[in-house]
Amino acid sequence: MKKTFDLIMPGLLVAATGVGAGDLITGAIAGNKLGLLIWLPIIGAFFKYILTDGIARYQFATGKPLVHGWVKELGKPFRYLFYFYLFIWSYCVGGALLNGATNSLALMTGMPKLFLSFSLCALAYFLVWTARFELFEKVMMVLIGLMFFAVIATSATLIQSPGELFQFKSVSFTSPWFLGLLGGVGGTLTIVCYGYWIQEEGRKGNEGYQKSKIDLAVSYSLTGLFSISMMIIGSKLPEVSKEGTKFITQISDLFLRELGTWAAWLFKIGFFCGIFSSLLGVWQSVPYLYADIRLLDKKEEEIDLKRSQPYRQFLTFISIASLSTIGMKFQFIQLIYAVVGALFIPLCALSLLMLLKRTEDPAFRNSRFQALMMMAIFLFFVAYGVHALVTKIT
């Protein structure tokens, strides 16, 4: 059992970190508005699988994370643009996750939100600051297990017959919920952090890549299944609120009516574990990116990024920045995030198309199918980004 978990753990970390409060709500609203278009999250998860697989292949081919290739190709101007993106992304996502986890736990315990926000932030900060990857993995394993079991198991009980899974409403392909679900499955920036997690596991070369193919297949299968589960739940509600506290209450009341108190509590626990595991994953992984770029020119052969000063500086930033958003409505900053966020996935796909052409080992280059998929991802997410931006502005 331990060997199995060791094999799939990096992929599970990607899955858990990529599922935030926004993804949960988007999945439920998509199910409510569109019906059970179960192929949507499957395609979305497959897109992210292709990209994360490419990120892994670049690292196995070069021995370096993908950000090294970006800096090498784009030079110093890229660093400053990436810093800007990273700080904006971390502020928005960190704040959203902390507020989501706080509201979820407050509903279960009735404790003051301010106290819970500081407590959850301090707990995440401590777990990451200790720099013990094994401890981080164990905590995440518990949260991931509860999250997937609670949400998938409770949603499955709502299905009366297999035929329900193929019922859907008339859908516009430009619907924000259609595009949001297809584009939002599996996270954005956090997929780049997969390279650091496989580095922690000591994976290298072709043998390491064969392991990664397995764990990424498990990861994105669970991600797709999780999104389908949220669509099932949303399809059973007359309406779904976009506001986190009302959203949790609506679904808890649904399970209370349909299945009883145990199901309502199981969903609440799973929802909290989903958001807190994403928060913990972001706290632990995103500082890698900042520290790696800051220390790129250092002469030391081996640097433990987790214990480096830049890593801990960024960890401190994301913790304090997230606390500063408690109870705040920051529409303007979300607009900026929508712009830079919409750029990330297509630019990642485009960079992988170029960088993987130049790897010395042909075994890690894109096949025709992989190259075609990356081009399709690039084109789709450019269209998705433009549509999301226009929607935000109007």
Image (cartoon, grey):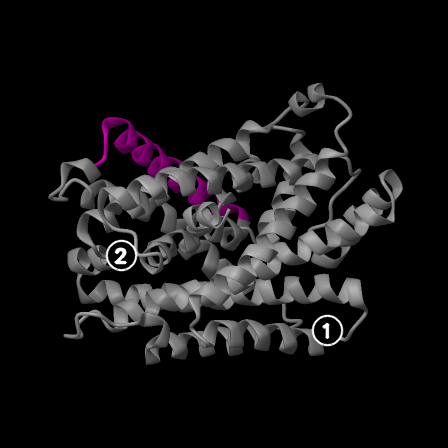
Image marks 2 and 1: residues in contact by CB distance under 8 Å: no
- Residue at 81%, 49% in the rendered image: 264
Q: Distance between the Cα atoms at labels 2 and 1?
A: 38 Å
**Residue at which label 2 appears:** 65
Whether residue 370 appears in this view of the structure is yes
Residue stretch rendered in magenta on the structure = 365-391
Q: Amino acid at mark 2?
A: Pro
Q: Amino acid at mark 1?
A: Lys
- Callout 2 crowding tier (Cα within 10 Å): few <14, some 14–19, many ≥20: many
Q: Nearer the viewer, mark 2 or mark 1?
A: 2
Q: Disc 1 on helix, strand or loop?
A: helix
Residue 194 within the magenta-colored segment of the rendering: no
- Callout 1 crowding tier (Cα within 10 Å): few <14, some 14–19, many ≥20: some
Q: Disc 2 on helix, strand or loop?
A: loop
Q: Is residue 202 left or right of residue 319?
A: left
Percent x, y of residue 29: 67, 41
Which quadrant of the structure image shows residue 73? Answer: bottom left
